[in-house]
Amino acid sequence: MRISAMFDERIVDKPSEFQIGRPGYPDMRFGYGLHTRFGQYVNGVQIPGILKPLLKKGSVTRAGNLEYDGPFPSSLKVRAV
């Protein structure tokens, strides 16, 4: 079961597909307008800093299952192949 509004097909076109050119406005993980969370700025630096060295190693594949902490994803192990 999807618990996120970001998977509402009335608002988000093809929500289950990864789309590089998807506009950011339906993405509500960091809030919107006056309620925007500071984490979006931290993650804008932190996520590329984590992924760039991993992706430079070549192809990446899952090395385990996506783990959850309640309704939220908490861990996904990957390995470079």
Image (cartoon, rainbow, N blue to C red):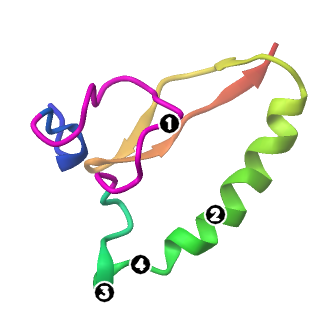
- Position in image of residue 52 (x %, y %): 81, 43
Read off the residue under disc 1.
21
The label number, if any, that marks residue 34 in the structure image:
3
- Label 4 amino acid? Arg
| Quadrant (top left, top right, bottom left, bottom right) of the C terminus | top right
The answer to whether 24 is drawn above or below residue 75 in the figure is below
Provide the residue span drawn in magenta. Answer: 10-27
Residue closer to the observer: 6 or 69 = 6
> Do tag 4 and tag 1 residues touch (Cβ < 8 Å)?
no
Q: Identify the element where label 1 is drawn.
A: loop
Q: Identify the element where label 4 is drawn.
A: loop
Q: CA distance from mark 3 to mark 2?
A: 19 Å
Q: CA distance from mark 3 to mark 4?
A: 9 Å
Read off the residue under disc 4.
37
Which quarter of the figure has residue 29? bottom left
- Label 1 amino acid? Gly
Read off the residue under disc 2.
44
Q: Nearer the observer, disc 2 or disc 1?
A: 1
Q: Residue at x 60, y 64 (%)?
A: 43
- Label 2 amino acid? Gly
Q: Nearer the observer, disc 3 or disc 2?
A: 3
Predominant SS along the magenta part: loop
Mark toward the start of the polypeptide (3 vs 2) = 3
